[in-house]
Amino acid sequence: MRILIDGLDLSGKSTLAARLTTALEERNLRPIHHRGFLAPHNPLTSPLDTVKAPDHPMSALLNTSYLAGCVLDKALGGARGWERRGLLVQESYVDRCLAYGYASGPWPAARLALRTPGMFVGFDLAVYLGAPLHVRRERLSRRVGANSIDRLSVLSEKFHDDFMTALAMAGRRHRRVLTFDTSRHSTELITEQITEHVTQLLSDGKGSRGGDREKHRKEAFR
């Protein structure tokens, strides 16, 4: 089973991914917390790892390169290897790349890819996090070592809206999508909600790509 945690910067992705991994471990579900490309032998992983993370959303070329790498992930079947080991908790993936490419440029590759998001690996459960602009700006003021990505993410209401619009478009390829406003819901509550959904999917026999196909479902928790 594959679970994605993604969304705006300064919305609590890393904290939630770590907390969810612990919660699933407590249920003996053998989760794997992972960041970056899924395919272990993706030929674009090494060269892109040499680029500083804050540069990623600032360049159409880098955005295109990352999207190409994520297309290769699906072609190389990387996600299947993770599934054989248990639950995958993926912290950020192509969804964020698409959203930055759409909100920053919009870069041509991101706009084109959002028309056919099925070219990328889909997840059994995608969790998108967000928070109002003023809340994330306040969080930025308290963040030590904030980088250009953090600052870009609070650029304007338009950037925020474009980013979330792109996430919704990218989310069409997932089986189920949950959206949370982290200014209104605690990490503990969100973790509990996700764990319940994971348990339900597993009990329904839909926790792997080999299970029955579930109609795409989207839920928002405001």
Image: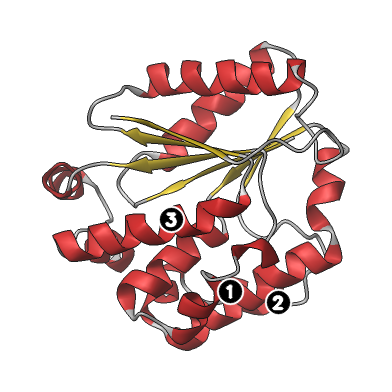
Q: Which residue is mark 2?
A: 44
In the rendered image, the quadrant that contains the C terminus is: top left
Q: Position of residue 196 (x, y in %)?
A: 57, 15
Left or right of 10, for residue 92: right
Residue drawn 75% across the image and 29% down it: 207
Q: Nearer the viewer, residue 215 or 21?
A: 215
Q: Earlier in the sequence, mark 3 or mark 2?
A: 2
Are the residues tagged 1 and 2 within 8 Å (C-beta)?
yes
Q: Is residue 107 above or below residue 150?
A: below
**Looking at the rendering, which quadrant does residue 201 occupy?**
top right
Q: Nearer the viewer, residue 139 or 176?
A: 176
Amino acid type at mark 1: Tyr
Residue drawn 42% across the image and 74% down it: 101
Decide: few, some or many residues near mark 2? Use Cα within 10 Å; few <14, some 14-19, many ≥20. Answer: some
Q: Position of residue 111 (x, y in %)?
A: 46, 77
Residue 66: image tag: 1
**Looking at the rendering, which quadrant does residue 209 occupy?**
top right
Left or right of 50, for residue 218: left
